[in-house]
Amino acid sequence: MPLRSRLAMLTAAAVAIAVALCAAASWAIVRDQLNEQLDSSLRASSPETAYLQLQGQACSGDASAGAQLSRFPPTTYTVQLVSQGGDVCTSQGKSPIPATAADKAVAQGVVRSVLHTARAQDGREMRVWTQRYQVAGGHVTASLATPTDQVDRPLDQLALILLIVAGVGVLCAATTGLWVAQAGLRPVDRLAEAVEHVARTEDLGLRIPVEGEDEIARLSRSFNAMTAALASSRDLQQQLIADAGHELRTPLTSMRTNIDLLVRIEQSGRQIPAEEKKALLDSVKAQMVELATLIGDLQELSRTPGAGQGGHAGVVALHETVRTALRRARLRGPHLDVVDELDDWYVLAEPAALERAVVNLLDNAVKFSPEGGTVEVRLRQGVLTVRDHGPGIPAEDLPHVFERFWRSPSARSLPGSGLGLSIVARTVAQAGGTVRLRAAEGGGTEAVVQLPGAPTPPPQDVPRDVPQGTGPAAQAGPGEPPPSEGPRPRADRADRADRTDRTDRRDRADGTDGVDGERGPGGGGDTPSED
């Protein structure tokens, strides 16, 4: 059943119940009032004493008394005399009413009067008022009765009127409820049509007009926000695919060119100098390394947080992670002076992802530092700064440095894919921190990473499945130790060892042994701001 029909039925049912209660209460009140009026009229009506005397004589067999009764005007009341034994003598033309115990009690002088309902011999229901009267020669007990149908008939008519009015009211309420439901649910119909349209056409540009501040307006705003987010996500996905295809085309084209050249030389039987052949093979190896690194970066960006080996958040000694990354940076930049000042700091993050982010920052600084330059690394109260003395970043390029595949014009001739800082930003955000780049005083670029944590190691273990960015370390302020990670699982250590081994193999395949300023593991050498 449609929702609007259910609302109309509920409205009609509610009105029907209310009208029924009101009608019943009205009928009961009118009944009580009419019965009270009937009783009052009986109490106020008393037969004449002469009439009672003559009726008593007529009941004793006096024919002349019966003739004299005809002189009295007719009345709607039934008048009958009641003896102590319960015998009754009813006025002419009226149906006798059997005496009850209450009537006999009045005749016997036990009670003075009584009011009750009885049924006459003809079947009519009567309201009876019995009382003792003073007449000449003593007392007489007489009952004055009137039919109750003078109350029942108006009550029946009132019940019929109330029933008709209640039916009309319920019908009007159902019609009004249906109209109100249709009007109230019209925005819901528009929302349902919009959802069906999106499901049918995949058109995420559809927006629903928002009117007012009620729940329907809130639902419309939520739907518009959802479709906008989905459209943005799809645009980003399409842009990522297009950019990835463009970036993959360059190393593939170079590899194909070099391999085709080697194949043609081999097929022609010509000999080329060993140095030229080695240069071609080295170029192919370099392009393979660049291609593998780009694919690894894409996999890292597409990975769901917390998935894979070492993907669970745990307490990490950030200063130790930075020291490990510094050793690699010094190998990759032996011509540079890398200085560091590191305070102890513990954070809640994915160990492998955090190390990758730090390596990316350091490799970036190494790659863009001039010969004999200095790279300054500091960690104080959870703030990690990495400063180089390179050419710096133009101010107009700063808003784009964390975009995927974005590279400044001055860095497009350098190796890299433009994914390094995207990985850094994602990892830091998952750890509940912030990262930004800024121009350093005196030239160069300074990367600033701020992560929540504590300067002391945690006192106890915490479950390894704490979600990133939501655990105590992400919420702890300075001086508040986060929960302990406990011993690093073998999977984490194996994952780190495997990642380091793969990077070393890649450096050896590149022929640089990690000292030529090429990209660090995970594409860390490319900075969207300077690549």
Image (cartoon, grey):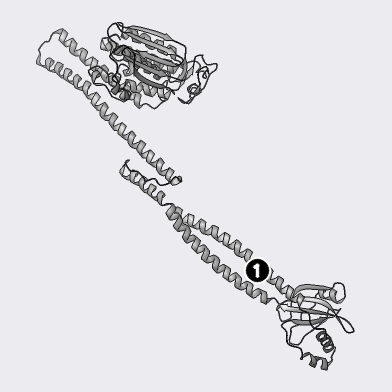
Between 359 and 408, the one nearer to me in the picture: 408
- Residue 326 vertical placement versus 7 (above, below): above
Which residue is located at x 23 percent, y 15 percent? 285
- Mark 1 Cα within 10 Å, few/some/many (few <14, many 20+)? some
User: Percent position (x, y) of residue 390?
Assistant: 29, 12
Q: Is residue 308 visible?
A: no
Between 217 and 356, the one nearer to me in the picture: 217
- Residue 256 vertical placement versus 85 (above, below): above
Which residue is located at x 39 percent, y 22 percent? 427
Which residue is located at x 30 percent, y 44 percent? 201
Quadrant where the C terminus sits is top left
Residue 360, image quadrant: top left
Mark 1 secondary-structure assignment: helix
Q: Residue furthest right?
A: 137
Residue that badge 1 annotates? 30
Disc 1 marks a residue whose amino acid type is Val
